Image (tube, grey):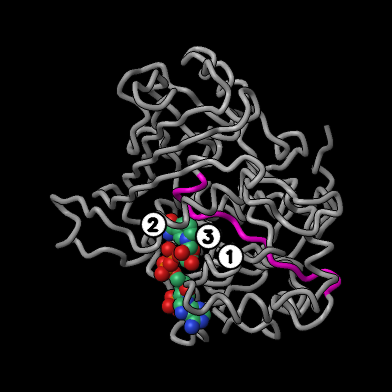
Amino acid sequence: MSSQKNQRELKVGILGATGTVGQRFIVLLSSHPYFKIHALGASARSAGQAYVKATKWKQSTPVPEFVREMVVKECKSSEFQGCDIVFSGLDHDVAGPIEKEFAEAELAVFSNAKNYRRDPLVPLVVPLVNPSHFDILPNQRSHPSNSSLFTKSLNKGCIVANANCSTTGIVVPLKALEDAFGPLDKIIVNTMQAISGAGYPGVSSMDILDNVVPYIGGEEEKIEWETSKILGGFTDSDKTAFDLHSQSPMKISASCNRVPVLDGHTEVVSCSFKKQPPPTPEQCIEVLRKYTCEAQDLGCPSAPKEVIHVHDEQDRPQPRLDRYYQNGAGVNVGRVRECPVLDIKFVVLSNNVSIGAATSSIMNAEIAVAKGFV
Ligand code: NAP
């Protein structure tokens, strides 16, 4: 096991620092052992103002003292000189060109936006699941002629994406089950997603109070194809492209709902295995409880001590009680039982703003540092 205890300090910037994910970055990074906040960026509306004036702070702890008076910058790499890494919580309608400009200026970009997730040279990494996908980065940096991603070869610059918040929750237990019992065959997932997942101010209170909205634009497609990329591997030994689980295609069907919960996505999952007879619920519970990940082995400071907490109580996990489990870095599972239609069914709860967004980006950056990619 390696340790990051003596890691030198690295200066980091936050793009979209005033938003929901940006605020969570600030909370988490303000006490990080070696990532030090050096620059904050947002839209032209916020640029030039002290951070505390530019943001509508919605976190339960105050704005960290050293951040309050930092002047928000425009999202241009020239404003982020001295930074090694930027974390992006930018809206997808602006993230594409901004993140590319930062990468081409030789910064390592860790993005929450959807823009580059499908790119064949961009690793889509849930840090508790597939850090091996960082191995694409040498190709990403060295083959501009083979892709539309960059206009030149890069040295230190890169783009690493983390997954959609609802995909992140389910792939963790699915990976644990695949590792132990072989490929999955079919997956059906129904989500009950928190309103913070839509950013601030998000869904109007008139639409969400006393209500469930059975549609979140683009979300079902994201779960269906992102799960395939994350649980897939590489197509060749040179690690030049991702295999979208095509060696053993699995069928995934997702139905997404917005519910009146502030933070924490709850998802009910049924799945079946290629290999029959399937494992029993007790075997699945044992495997989920024992699941460990590479971020732990690498000594990443943001890695949870326990990746998956399996609840014994029949009525858990619940968002209000369990969303801050391990500072929002782990995943909660409950009600693991036989499914009369597929093989096994269970409930997952994950913190959409933490492991579903900012914590994933930060842990991905820690892994990239530990593996020498940054
Ligand atoms: P948000 O609360 O709406 O924040 C958006 C941020 O983008 C703000 O800082 C905003 O700055 C900035 N921005 C908007 N237009 C800009 C421009 N033209 N130039 C530079 N900055 C601009 O959104 P969010 O929920 O934090 O989501 C951020 C990203 O993370 C999105 O791509 C989202 O899909 C993804 N994501 C969100 C979650 C979640 O749970 N919320 C989970 C996973 C992924 P101003 O304040 O100056 O407008």
Q: Which stretch appears magenta?
A: 154-168
Residue 160 sits inside the magenta stretch = yes
* Residue 120, above or below 306: below
The kind of residue tagged 3 is: Pro
Q: Is 312 positioned to the left or the right of 184 in the image?
A: left
Q: Dot 1: few (<14), some (14–19), or many (≥20) neighbours within 10 Å?
A: few
Residue 66, disc: 1
* Residue 63, above or below 311: below
Callouts 1 and 3 close, C-beta under 8 Å: yes
Q: In the image, which is nearer the foreground, mark 2 or mark 3?
A: 2
Dividing the picture into quadrants, the one containing residue 70 is: bottom right
Dividing the picture into quadrants, the one containing residue 95 is: bottom right
Residue 213 sits inside the magenta stretch = no
Q: Which of marks 2 and 1 is nearer the N terminus?
A: 1
What residue sits 70% from the left and 75% below the top? 149
What is the x, y in percent for residue 370? 81, 48
Count the numbered circles shown: 3
Residue 64, disc: 3
The kind of residue tagged 2 is: Gly
Residue 197, disc: 2
* Residue 299, above or below 157: above
Q: Identify the element where label 3 is drawn.
A: loop
CA–CA distance in space, label 2 to label 3: 23 Å
What is the x, y in percent for residue 100? 66, 77
CA–CA distance in space, label 1 to label 3: 6 Å
Q: Mark 3: is the Cβ under 8 angstroms from ligand 1? A: no
Q: Dot 2: few (<14), some (14–19), or many (≥20) neighbours within 10 Å?
A: many
